[in-house]
Image (tube, helix red, strand yellow):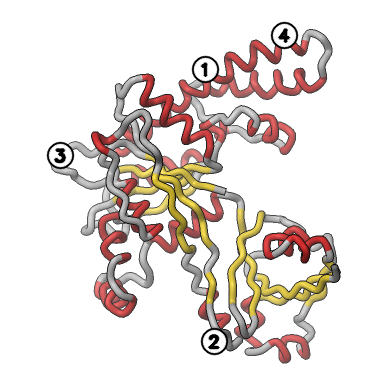
Amino acid sequence: MEIGIVGLPASGKTTLFNALTGSHASAFAGGSGAGLKPNVGVAKIPDPRLPLIATFIATKKIVNATIQFVDIPGVAPGGGAAKLNAFLVHVRQVDAIVQVVRCFDDGSGKINPASDIDSMETDLVIADMSVVEGALDKAQRTARTGDADAKARVAVLEKCNALLNEGKAIRSAAWNDAEAAVLRTYGLVTSKPVLYVGNVAEDDLQGASAHAKAVLDHAKKTGQQSVVVCAKLEAELAEIDEAERDDMLKSMGLEEPANGPLARAANRLLGLTTFYTAGEKEVRAWPVRIGAPAPEAAGSIHTDIERGFIRAECYSVDDLVQYKNEKSIREAGKLRSEGKNYAIKDGDVVHFLFNV
């Protein structure tokens, strides 16, 4: 699964991409352009529970979960149809969107996060309107023959059309599983979940400015997630060694780089939660779909484990902290033996038993 990073030119999205992935990509020439390839990179998801587990279970290495980010070439307002279409091709291919919104003065003296958000949202709504109108006409013609699938598509597309004509994103409405499945077949960009990132100056790390609050308020109003980040600072922190980074954070009154909360929010944006495996070889975090049954979680480790799944022995990280080791957890009756219908919970430490 991939998350696309979008934003208007000079929003700092490539700087943020570099901070998250450890890349050294350059900003796209001229801010945008048809034919430019996105930057693609993998980011570790900082997870304070991993070293915590390792304090109780001796291990040789710690392995973080990862997430793939795609830095998509931006389009300036009035950038032209070719550039907008190239941008939309890339956005349609990702599973979720991180929109970087400039909340700092780039020298122009013009800072208007609300306008920047509205500008991009308007382009995406218009793009979806074009797709929906064409698809609706085709589905209506097919539905006249009595085709049940086409009738279901008409109902979904008419609902989309009504929202878009009001200038609303498709994600703003509630959709059941069957409707969501129909939406996915059209690659509608405003149906994708969004994480709004207020990119602030170094003197506004807590997001106290009116500009940052405008981003946070918009996210809350639209039911989406948001974080505040200083991409420039995050990129600098990514380049220095851990001890120096910790000292620098401490001097700023911060516990961790902001890319930690951002990466974890991005993971939630994809509808994922985290479980762990722990042993002498490694302590490892595994992302899995929220509500996934135990065999599906086992399959994220190896398909053979899913195929031969017998049961999952589970306890929580909190149990480990309280009882200090697995032996004590078992003796306290906190080690759970779960079957195929068990939905993995966030923070579960799991040992899968299987036979193939």
Question: Counting residues from the N terminus, which is met first, the one under dot 3 or under dot 2?
Answer: 2
| Image position of 208 with respect to 120: above or below | below
| Residue hosting label 4 | 141
Residue visible at 73% across and 64% down? 298
Q: Position of residue 14 (x, y in %)?
A: 32, 47
Kindly identify which residue carries mark 3: 109
Residue drawn at 30 percent across, 29 percent down? 76
Q: Which image quarter holds the C terminus? A: bottom right
Distance from Cα at disc 4 to Cα at disc 2:
64 Å
Q: Secondary structure at mark 2?
A: helix
Between 171 and 71, the one nearer to me in the picture = 71
Find disc 2 in the rendering and name its residue. 55
Q: Amino acid at mark 3?
A: Gly
Residue where numbered disc 1 is placed: 130
- Give the mark nearest the N terminus, 4 or 2: 2
Distance of label 2 from label 1 (alpha carbons): 55 Å
Q: Residue at x 71, y 63 (%)?
A: 302
Foreground mark, 3 or 2, reads 2
Q: Secondary structure at mark 1?
A: helix
Mark 2 crowd level (few <14, some 14–19, many ≥20, 10 Å Cα) = some
Percent x, y of residue 210: 28, 46
Q: Earlier in the sequence, mark 3 or mark 1?
A: 3
